[in-house]
C-alpha cells in the first residue's frame, strides 16, 4: 500500500513493494581509525552520527519488507579494478592497497572493508561491492533493482557529498526517484553534508528529495 513520505522539496508517495533502502559504504574503512577515511586526513568520528538513524531506518525497512541493499567501496587484492588515477593519490604508505591496522586499505576481504557491526547486513540482504564512488558503476545494482521492479531508492550512508551524492545522481539519471535520508548520511565536512543535501532538494528537487529518518520511519510504518 502506498504511503506519503514528508520530504523536501515536496512530499512523495512511496510503495514499499517498489522501494529499496540503499545503505552506502558504512564500512570500518570509513568510520573507524586506521582505515581509508583516516588515511585521507579525516576525523572519522564525525561519521558516527549517521549510525543510529540508519539502524532505525533499517529496522523499519525490514519490518515493511523493503528490498535492502548494502554497498561496500573497495578493490580486488591485485588492484586490477582500481584505475591508476584513483591509486596515485595520497601518501604511498597510506594509499589504497597499503597495509594498515585493519588490513590493506580499501581491499575486499580485509577487516577494514567490512560493514560496521551495528549495521551488519542480515541474511538475504543484497551486498554490492563497488569499485567506484557510485553504486551503479561496474556493479549489478541496476539488474538487482530491475528484477524487483524498484522505482524509488531511499539512500543513506557515507559520505554525503561523495558516494551518496554520486549514487543519487546515477540513480536519478536511470529514472529512479532518489530520496536522501538526511540524518542517515554524514560527511567528514559538516558544511559539505549540509550543502550536499541542499543541492539535491534545490531547484524543485533537481535530482532527488531529502527526508529525515523520522519521516521515512513514519511513512514505512503507516503513521504519516
Ligand atoms: N572520502 C570520502 O569522503 N568518501 C569516499 O572516499 N567514499 C565514500 O564516500 N564512500
Image: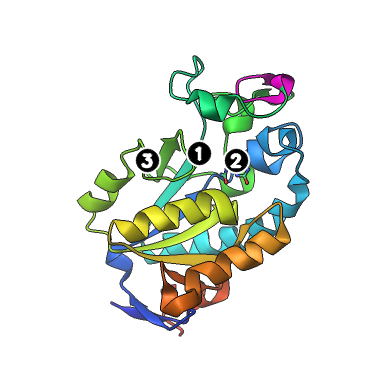
Q: Which color scheme does this rendered protein use?
A: rainbow
Which secondary structure lies at badge 2?
loop
Please indicate, yes or no, whether residue 169 appears anywhere in the rendered image: yes
* Residue 27 marker: 2
Q: Are marks 3 and 2 in contact (CB under 8 Å)?
A: no
> Is the C-beta of the residue carrying label 1 under 8 Å from the nearest atom of ligand 1?
no
**Tag 1: Cα neighbours inside 10 Å, few (<14), some, or many (≥20)?**
many
Residue 220 image offset from top left, x and y in percent? 42, 73
Please indicate, yes or no, whether residue 108 appears anywhere in the rendered image: no
Q: Which residue: 60% across, 24% down? A: 88
Q: Are marks 1 and 2 in contact (CB under 8 Å)?
A: yes
Q: Which residue: 63% across, 48% down? A: 118
> Is the C-beta of the residue carrying label 2 under 8 Å from the nearest atom of ligand 1?
yes
Residue 139, picture quadrant: top left
Which secondary structure lies at badge 1?
strand
Residue 183, picture quadrant: bottom right
Task: Decide if residue 204 is on the left or right side of residue 105.
Answer: left
Query: Between disc 3 and disc 2, whose residue precedes?
Result: 2
Residue 125 image offset from top left, x and y in percent? 40, 46
Q: Which residues are magenta?
A: 92-99
Q: Which residue: 49% across, 42% down? A: 133
Task: Look at mark 1 in the image and give the residue it sits on.
Answer: 72
Residue 141 image offset from top left, x and y in percent? 33, 44
Query: Between disc 1 and disc 3, whose residue precedes?
Result: 1
Query: Between disc 1 and disc 2, whose residue precedes?
Result: 2
Q: Is residue 93 magenta?
A: yes
Q: Quadrant of the N terminus?
A: bottom left
Amino acid at each position: 500500500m502506498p504511503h506519503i513520505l514528508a520530504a523536501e522539496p515536496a512530499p512523495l508517495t512511496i510503495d514499499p513493494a517498489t522501494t529499496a533502502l540503499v545503505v552506502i559504504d558504512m564500512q570500518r574503512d570509513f568510520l573507524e581509525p586506521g582505515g581509508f577515511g583516516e588515511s585521507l586526513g579525516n576525523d572519522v568520528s564525525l561519521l558516527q552520527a549517521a549510525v543510529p538513524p540508519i539502524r532505525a531506518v533499517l529496522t523499519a525497512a525490514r519490518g515493511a519488507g523493503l528490498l535492502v541493499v548494502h554497498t561496500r567501496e573497495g578493490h580486488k587484492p591485485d588492484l586490477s579494478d582500481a584505475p591508476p588515477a584513483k591509486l596515485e593519490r595520497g601518501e604511498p604508505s597510506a594509499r589504497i592497497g597499503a597495509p594498515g591496522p585493519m588490513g590493506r586499505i580499501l581491499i575486499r576481504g580485509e577487516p577494514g572493508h567490512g560493514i560496521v557491526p551495528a549495521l551488519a547486513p542480515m541474511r538475504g540482504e543484497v551486498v554490492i561491492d563497488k569499485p567506484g564512488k557510485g553504486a551503479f558503476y561496474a556493479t549489478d545494482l541496476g539488474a538487482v533493482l530491475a528484477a524487483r521492479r524498484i522505482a524509488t531508492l531511499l539512500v543513506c550512508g557515507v559520505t554525503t557529498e561523495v558516494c551518496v551524492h554520486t549514487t543519487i545522481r546515477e540513480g536519478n539519471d536511470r529514472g529512479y526517484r532518489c530520496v536522501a535520508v538526511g540524518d542517515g548520511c554524514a560527511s567528514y565536512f559538516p558544511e559539505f553534508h549540509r550543502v550536499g543535501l541542499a543541492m539535491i532538494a534545490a531547484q524543485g528537487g533537481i535530482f532527488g528529495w531529502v527526508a529525515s529518518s523520522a519521516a521515512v520511519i513514519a511513512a514505512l510504518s503507516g503513521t504519516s
